[in-house]
Image (tube, coloured by chain):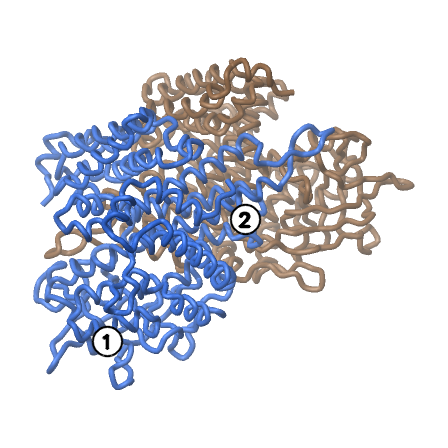
Chain colours: A brown, B blue
């Protein structure tokens, strides 16, 4: 109970088999380095970020004379974060990064997210864009932009959604047109986090726009659109409004208009979306870390409160701490268990991504990473909101007030299952792309999970039940009725993922993940297959998806 | 889909067997009257309350020079609500009420809660206090107060919690002392909704205070403490602060100090808590109606949005309305199904309360009402928050913004599982008082539920599984381990309650309530009994509760 987040992370790294493999493959990666980074990150987060979150929630961001003003303290925090080298931890050294494994970045990130989730949106997009440009931009663009993003001199955004193209990326209408020696883009983008701000001199927008005369995503190319032209003049970009949101008040969500804005083509024409996936992948992993940070905050606060607050017991004796009330104990146990399973899963995901970079695109690690990503994205998001919500219940009336950060945690976390691909999109990804189209990642998952739970029958039961469900869903490939079960299938996969992680946790933390495993999996199976049963098989076959 | 809330209510009243019994017993109760009241309530709510909710959320309440200022429009709304006779609908005619059944009040209430949940807190406490005083106050006090509460000239609050006595009512420390010809109270009360406001000339606080030299709740008596003395001078009451909350901004939550404040003893000394239950019962039913109002709002908005918003489909064809996307269809179906089951359950509860007043305290109806109340309180609360939360997901990013009332619905609803008795308290009530101490209400529930689902095997399966679980939990009466299962037992009871309601709903609305019934009940049974299994039976017996 008394371990802090950094200690918990180190303990779980040690318990992760892939960590040993990674340390063997990369001499720059060992427990000592991890420990030093986590210590430094914790110190920086406590010194620099801890006051930021609640203040930013109250102040919010403002649009003044067309420019976005961030809350008090953001500039100092940005400088401290950038100067600490945190934006560049895992960027290639040739671009000014430290070239460390992604795993170390993903390990330290939740320590920051715990204190200032909204602020960290600026860092997350900037860092992810630096990776994108390092990978796909031409040499000149990469040399100009990546070191400045790495140092925090400039920042970046990701611009996908438009008013009529949210989850449906293929309907993007922003036009890209060739000019004399380059490109320009014209159109609207919405839901752009930190689309403008006062932390840096220049912002680069990573924009999907239609450059080809083709429907769908194949007509889309990727462009870097700077906020100002090279000469320093405006680039035709207007911030139309900031969204007023339930939470994340410290992250300005911009609706933006681009009017013949100078743009740099990144990579190949017509390959915008697949290339942008470099950035999307990092931001989905970050979403998992955001949820983990919020869940950790909620655990720490609820546990401390429940050990202090006294209620109940015999009226003629002193009251007892509420941590000893059975229902409070149940809630605390669920919160911690869900949080530590997520922490183990995030580390597994990051290590798998690092190994996939060593082993290559066709490796088992790459296939496994593609399978795990929708789970980390979605259940990091869901756990953040759920654990904070239970935290409110532990504190009772106090938890409903702004005296405690739990209610902000719930409000901030609520967007996590929406942005970077909704729950519905993650479920379709897992079912259609990671089962029906290609089940290699699933098979790697099952092999690894089985190996690690050989002597853990409770965990094994859950994993085998998921394997059977996957086979059953595979038998209904392409049937419309099966799509009704995508969400339950996603949930079953997460329960299996947690069962895999259980041996890495303390027994008390693992127990709630495994309890009633048979019953949970029976329920999820019934839900997942209900749609295919409801439509007759003949109907389903007749209406196979295109 | 296109039925409005009033039409849905009428349809469900007709489908409720107890409604026929009630109409037979009370000549003032028929469908025509119900229809007229619902029509009038809908009109009033749309005209007077619909603009109030969002504005109050933004403005909030302020403490100025020691007095609470309510948001714009509250005074006009209060006057309209009071002059419409809505506070007095089911108050006895001798006190200026209309004397109609509680059922008609509970039927119209969600139409108001849908638009302005926070504002309705003032009306709810005032009305409930009027009933309390009509039942328990001496004649003079009742004659002075009840007609003025009924007309909205004065208002009232309920004051239970103190800093060290939240759920643990037995630790209340506020002192009541006899003065020459009466009583005075001194101490602090917290979480007092509308503890002060500018809607009326005088507020009566229904206060629990310790008048007897006894520990626990038996030392508590009930007092009416007016905000001003009869002469008009102050009565020693100070508003110390307003809580800053996640939601319910339009309801001022006061921390209050009482200093030798003149107080009127209500009813018998030492019987404060049991007497106050008249008020608590009405406020717990109101909590169910609050959740129902918020859930209804969320359904209506999400359904309309999903029929308008177009996304997806083949890229070379027009986009399709998202209501046709399988995962959105699943969410809409869950929302509506949960909402209509709750509506049926609220009406059953209200009718049962009306019948218990006709049949008396020892009747089956009274026993059933006591069994149903924790379920209505808790799952009205939970459904309000859950349905609004799914609604946000249906709208995606838009749902996260203040352009739509869904995020406010989630924030407002979040307190419902905390106040008027937390989820944990409702679960203990159902397990300890309504199973271990006296299972008559459970038996009436099972008899009625079985009779109405005789030809509905899916519903019947759930009800029988709950009956078996209740027997199993009863066999562990008094064992500490069983308390860990109280929450799962509460959930199992609600699932059985919904299964009972299923035949009253449209088949499409009922289907999700019954789907995977066997699997859900197996899971809840395993959860409910896990604690008793974990502690050995011998340990459990040895540590039987006092």
On screen, residue B2 versus residue B375, left or right, reads right
When the figure is inspected, residue A515 is found, relative to residue A410, above or below; the finding is: above
Give coordinates of residue A193: x percent, y percent. 63, 48
**Figure quadrant of residue A497:** top left
When the figure is inspected, residue A124 is found, relative to residue A25, above or below; the finding is: below
Q: Are marks 2 and 1 on the same chain?
A: yes
**Figure quadrant of residue B460:** top left
Residue sticking out furthest to the right: A180
**Label 1 residue SS:** helix
Mark 1 Cα-neighbour bin, 10 Å: few <14, some 14–19, many ≥20: few
On screen, residue A160 versus residue B273, left or right, reads right
Q: How many marks?
A: 2
Give coordinates of residue A389: x percent, y percent. 40, 46
When the figure is inspected, residue B527 is found, relative to residue B269, above or below; the finding is: above
Asked if disc 2 and disc 1 are in contact, CB closer than 8 Å, the reply is no
On screen, residue B200 versus residue A309, left or right, reads right
Question: At x 59% / y 36%, what residue is drawn?
Answer: B322
Label 1 marks which chain's residue?
B
Give coordinates of residue A360: x percent, y percent. 63, 21
Please give the residue where the numbered disc 1 appears in the rendered image.
B144
When the figure is inspected, residue B457 is found, relative to residue B372, above or below; the finding is: above
Task: Give the number of the disc on residue B400.
Answer: 2
């Amino acid at each position: 109970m008394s371990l802090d987040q950094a200690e918990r992370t180190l303990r779980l790294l040690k318990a992760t088999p892939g960590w040993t493999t990674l340390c063997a493959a990369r001499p720059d990666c060992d427990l000592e380095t991890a420990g030093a980074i986590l210590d430094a990150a914790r110190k920086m987060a406590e010194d620099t970020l801890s006051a930021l979150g609640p203040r930013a929630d109250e102040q919010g961001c403002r649009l003044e004379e067309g420019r976005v003003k961030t809350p008090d303290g953001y500039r100092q925090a940005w400088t401290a974060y950038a100067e600490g080298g945190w934006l560049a931890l895992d960027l290639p050294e040739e671009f000014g990064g430290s070239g460390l494994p992604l795993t170390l970045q993903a390990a330290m990130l939740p320590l920051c997210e715990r204190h200032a989730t909204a602020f960290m949106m600026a860092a997350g997009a900037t860092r992810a864009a630096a990776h994108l440009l390092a990978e796909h931009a031409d040499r000149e663009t990469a040399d100009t932009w990546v070191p400045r993003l790495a140092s925090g001199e400039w920042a970046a955004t990701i611009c996908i959604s438009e008013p009529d193209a949210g989850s449906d990326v293929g309907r993007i209408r922003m036009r890209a047109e060739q000019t004399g020696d380059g490109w320009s883009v014209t159109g609207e983008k919405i839901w752009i986090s930190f689309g403008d701000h006062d932390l840096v001199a220049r912002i680069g927008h990573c924009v999907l726009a239609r450059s080809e005369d083709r429907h769908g995503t194949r007509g889309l190319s990727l462009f870097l659109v700077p906020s100002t032209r090279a000469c320093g003049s405006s680039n035709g970009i207007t911030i139309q409004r900031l969204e007023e949101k339930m939470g994340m008040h410290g992250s300005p969500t911009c609706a933006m208009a681009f009017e013949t804005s100078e743009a740099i083509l990144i990579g190949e024409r017509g390959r915008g979306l697949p290339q942008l996936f470099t950035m999307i992948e990092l931001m989905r992993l970050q979403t998992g870390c955001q949820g983990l940070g919020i869940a950790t905050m909620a655990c720490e606060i609820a546990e401390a409160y429940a050990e202090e607050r006294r209620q109940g017991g015999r009226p003629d004796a002193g009251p007892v701490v509420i941590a000893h009330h059975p229902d409070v104990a149940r809630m605390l146990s669920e919160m911690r268990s869900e949080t530590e399973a997520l922490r183990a899963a995030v580390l597994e995901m990051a290590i798998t991504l690092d190994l996939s970079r060593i082993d290559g695109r066709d490796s088992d690690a790459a296939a496994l990473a593609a399978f795990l990503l929708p789970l980390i994205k979605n259940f990091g998001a869901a756990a953040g909101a759920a654990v904070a919500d239970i935290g409110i219940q532990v504190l009772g009336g106090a938890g409903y007030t702004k005296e405690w950060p739990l209610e902000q945690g719930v409000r901030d976390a609520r967007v996590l299952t929406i942005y970077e691909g909704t729950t519905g999109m993650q479920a379709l990804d897992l079912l259609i792309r990671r089962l029906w189209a290609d089940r290699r990642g699933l098979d790697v998952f099952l092999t690894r999970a089985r190996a690690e739970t050989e002597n853990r029958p409770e965990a094994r039961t859950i994993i085998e039940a998921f394997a059977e469900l996957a086979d059953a869903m595979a038998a209904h490939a392409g049937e419309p009725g099966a799509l009704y079960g995508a969400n339950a299938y996603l949930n079953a996969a997460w329960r299996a993922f947690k069962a895999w992680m259980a041996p890495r946790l303390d027994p008390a933390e693992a127990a709630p993940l495994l309890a009633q495993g048979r019953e949970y999996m029976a329920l999820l199976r019934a839900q997942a297959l209900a749609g295919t049963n409801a439509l007759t098989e003949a109907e389903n076959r007749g209406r196979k998806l295109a």
